[in-house]
Image (spheres, grey):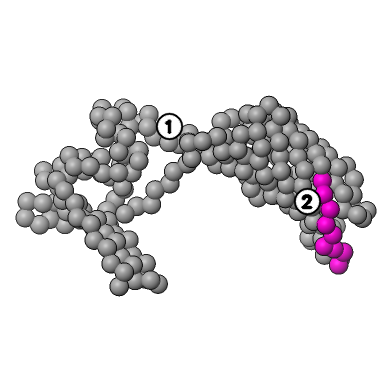
Amino acid sequence: MKCILSTPANASEWRSGLSCSSKGLGIKLIEYINGDWGFFADSFITEDSNKELETVTTRIGVKIYLNKIKRGYFLNGSISSYESTTGEGPIDGFSLGCGYIYDLSDSWFANIETGFLYLGNNNSGFYLAGSCDLSWTSLFKNRRKKREEQLAKTGWSREIINAVMEHKIRVGMTMDQVLESWGNPDSKYTSGNYQIWQYETFYSYSGYYHSYTLYFTNGILNHWDEYESNN
């Protein structure tokens, strides 16, 4: 059976992105947002004159959205760590900041931030940063919406469209509808009056095997069998 990828229907959101700042180039590893708050993890690096890695500054923190809609003005605070390839560190500290998030599209956001980073050494001080973030949650939701709009043009019933969107099958589906829902089968063959499709999952390291065998009559799904083994 094919894997199903779904996104939550609540207000939570996952983002990641690339950034640059007065502390170097960086990457937002992950940001999770739930309503008016969220947490994040990012890292910034600097290079020496030979383009070799010189310092790494990592932050793990909490972000508060002042307008409670996951964009606009925000405040953040984090615990931070600094380490240098010259042997300095790791040194722990903290940062406090504020900023603004602009909508570039339904899935892309521009993030402008300033604040103070304390590391107990000469690298403490004010910083200015910017990033371009991708919302994975919005991206998948938009893809789902576009697919549903495409399926609506087929003339299929709402029940069939809902089943396909949820990657389900039901008796009475055509072969095209099953293909849209589960994708191509692992094997096809004919037996008597039936056209048979088989979807298989096998994990060699554990010996787990799972299959669905679908039986079509004149191109219409008649019934299916399920088989599972842990040998």
Classed neighbour count for the residue bearing mark 2: other residues with Cα under 10 Å, few (<14), some (14–19), many (≥20): some
x and y percent of residue 84 in the render?
A: 83, 62
Instruction: From the viewer's perspective, tell me whether residue 190 is left or right of residue 131.
Output: left
Residue annotated with mark 1: 145
x and y percent of residue 21 in the render?
A: 79, 43
Q: Is residue 91 magenta?
A: yes
Mark 2 to mark 1: distance in Å?
39 Å
Q: Amino acid at mark 1?
A: Lys
Can you say whether 70 is above or below 169 in the image?
above
- Which region is colored magenta? 86-95
Image quadrant occupied by the N terminus: bottom left
x and y percent of residue 14 in the render?
A: 58, 42
Mark linked to residue 72: none
Visible residue check, residue 25: no
Foreground: 201 or 13? 13
Visible residue check, residue 197: yes
Q: Amino acid at mark 2?
A: Ile
Mark linked to residue 79: 2
Foreground: 43 or 38? 38
Badge 2 marks a residue whose secondary structure is strand
User: Quadrant of the rendered structure where residue 156 is?
Assistant: top left
Badge 1 marks a residue whose secondary structure is helix
Instruction: From the viewer's perspective, tell me whether residue 142 is left or right of residue 68.
Output: left
Image quadrant occupied by the C terminus: bottom left
Q: What residue is at 6 percent from the left and 51 percent from the top?
A: 193
Q: Earlier in the sequence, mark 2 or mark 1?
A: 2
